[in-house]
Image (cartoon, rainbow, N blue to C red):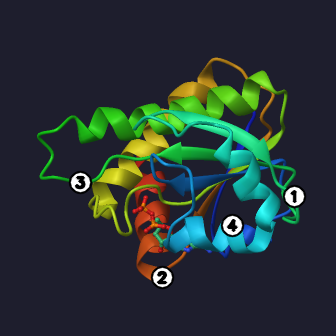
Amino acid sequence: MSKTSIEIIQADITALPVDVIVNAANRSLMGGGGVDGAIHRAAGPQLLEECRGLNGCMTGEAKMTSGYNLPARHVIHAVGPVWDGGKRDEDRLLGNCYRNCLRLADQAGLTSIAFPSISTGVYRFPIERACHIALTETLRFLEQGTSLEKVIFTCFSDQDLQCYRETYRRLSL
Ligand code: ADP
């Protein structure tokens, strides 16, 4: 068992005072709708300036920036797969997102990270399936030992919150 605590909460991720929040970005890293838009609005225009210099990001990969006006010190921009029925490697690519975010946070020696539910908004990944991948990849990563003391899964809707809590309960049995 790892010593890192896992929290599943309903919140606006832009309000969380953690070391790093994860953005469900697109490959351009130039902002968008959903959580991406909310993060850029709350961080201010300097975030877009820094993102401009990153030359985008491949699906399944992640890149870190400063958090600017956010209460979070950093942002990790991760690009989830667009759901297309499950035959285009979507499961593996989503798993890569979570692993790459955790690895970046760990390599920077960070202690707290908050994830949104990557790919389950505009990218239409089914929530139960995405939530299972998010939790299993994270639990597997934490078993290796890490600087991270707290991992927060931030749910926006009641349904997502229930799904994460129920899936986590089943995985911890
Ligand atoms: P994607 O394109 O990866 O599907 P979206 O931003 O459309 O990304 O949706 C990802 C998840 O983020 C959805 O569950 C959505 O409800 C949620 N979300 C949107 N805004 C916020 C926010 N401010 N804080 C936390 N989660 C959010």
Q: Secondary structure at mark 3?
A: loop
The image's mark for residue 68 is 1
| Quadrant (top left/top right/bottom left/bottom right) for the C terminus | top left
Q: Foreground: 173 or 116?
A: 116
In percent of width and height, residue 23 lies at 60, 55
Query: Which residue position holds label 3?
Result: 83
Measure the C-alpha gap from mark 1 to mark 4.
10 Å
Q: Secondary structure at mark 2?
A: helix
Crowding at label 3, few (<14), some or many (≥20) Cα neighbours within 10 Å? some
Measure the C-alpha gap from mark 3 to mark 2.
22 Å
Give the residue drawn at x 49%, y 33%: 61
In percent of width and height, residue 152 lies at 67, 55
Mark with earlier residue (4, 2):
4
Give the residue drawn at x 63%, y 17%: 144
Mark with earlier residue (1, 2):
1
What amino acid type is highlighted by mark number 2? Asp
Measure the C-alpha gap from mark 4 to mark 3.
24 Å
Query: Which residue position holds label 2?
Result: 158
- Nearest to viewer (mark 1 / mark 3): 1
Q: Foreground: 149 or 43?
A: 43
Q: Foreground: 49 or 42?
A: 49
Query: Which residue position holds label 4?
Result: 40
- Nearest to viewer (mark 3 / mark 2): 3
Mark with earlier residue (4, 3):
4
In percent of width and height, residue 56 lies at 53, 40
